Image (cartoon, helix red, strand yellow):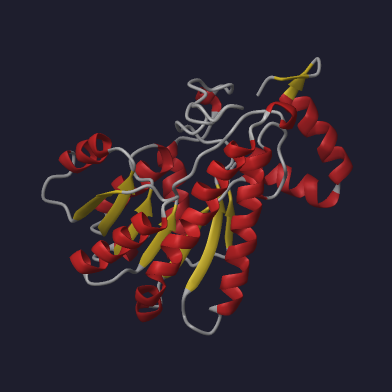
Amino acid sequence: MMKDFKNKVVVVTGGTDGIGKALVESLLESGAKVATCGRHHDKLYRLQSQYPGHPLHIFVADVSNENDCRNFIQSTVEVFGGIDVLINNAGVSMRALLKDLSTDVLHQVMNINFFGSVYCTRFALEALLQSKGSIVGVSSIAGYRGLPGRSGYSASKFALQGWLESIRTELLSSGVHVMWVCPGFTTSNIRQAALNADGLPQGESPMDESKMMSAEECARHILKAIAHRKRTLVLTFTGKRTVFLNKFFPGWADSLVQKFFFQEGKLVK
């Protein structure tokens, strides 16, 4: 499977932590040419220093900023000559009940998770049409099932999946592959970095991270799905069960999700 990426140019947004970092590392080890961006120069520099001599292009960018995305994609094409795969991975979560929530938090989450993917994809589209490449969105089970306390996160992932389905239909005859992946609960820093009601990082995870799929295993599944040009990918038993129950038994899913996230009327996860 990994030989499919040898000498391919792969763009991974948000490649300094979690699933994004695992994707970058797997791709570099497979012989791919990788471009990644992040908001923190120090994290990007540490990543680059781990792979001396490898074709890794790093770029400081906030994907919620359209000009940052334009400059990142343009610089990638200048460095590597094109793009074969774009993985829209950069994202942020949130954790707050609607009654406590500042609407600014909804804007932040939507700007990163949805518009960040829109910007990067739009600017990379010409290169992807030339290569007949792949556009990938890293979504979430929250894009299939609205989760309490994560209303803005769910909204952004529902929007991402609907948008990707639309452009997949637009590009059906172009040779460009469009897919999204839903990792389920995976070990990463997304819960620690999740925004609270005031838009500040939560700083801790409400979940037991030790029981989750590792970012490295998740990355392997994602890359295999891209290589096989899958339509969608839903990971973990819990994730697949949630999607199934929500589709066929939505009322039961409501009760199960409420029980999972609440105890004595309080949000605990």
Q: Work out whether 193 lies above or below 31.
A: above
Evaluate whether residue 8 shows in this view: no
- Image location of residue 109, percent across then percent down: 55, 43
Residue nearest the observer in this picture, 108 or 73 = 108
Residue nearest the observer in this picture, 191 or 112 = 112
**Which residue shows up at 36% across the image and 53% down it?**
12
**Which residue shows up at 26% across the image and 59% down it?**
32
Is residue 10 left or right of 227 when viewed as pictured? Answer: left
Q: Work out whether 226 lies above or below 16.
A: below
Q: Quadrant of residue 43?
A: top left
Quadrant that contains the C terminus: top right
Q: Quadrant of residue 148?
A: top right
Q: Work out whether 193 lies above or below 58.
A: above
Quadrant that contains the N terminus: bottom left
**Which residue shows up at 42% across the image and 49% down it?**
220
- The extreme bottom residue here reads 173
- Image location of residue 18, percent across then percent down: 41, 37
- Image location of residue 116, percent across then percent down: 47, 54
**Which residue shows up at 35% across the image and 45% down it?**
15
Is residue 194 left or right of 269 when viewed as pictured? Answer: left
- The extreme left residue here reads 53
- Image location of residue 53, percent across then percent down: 11, 50
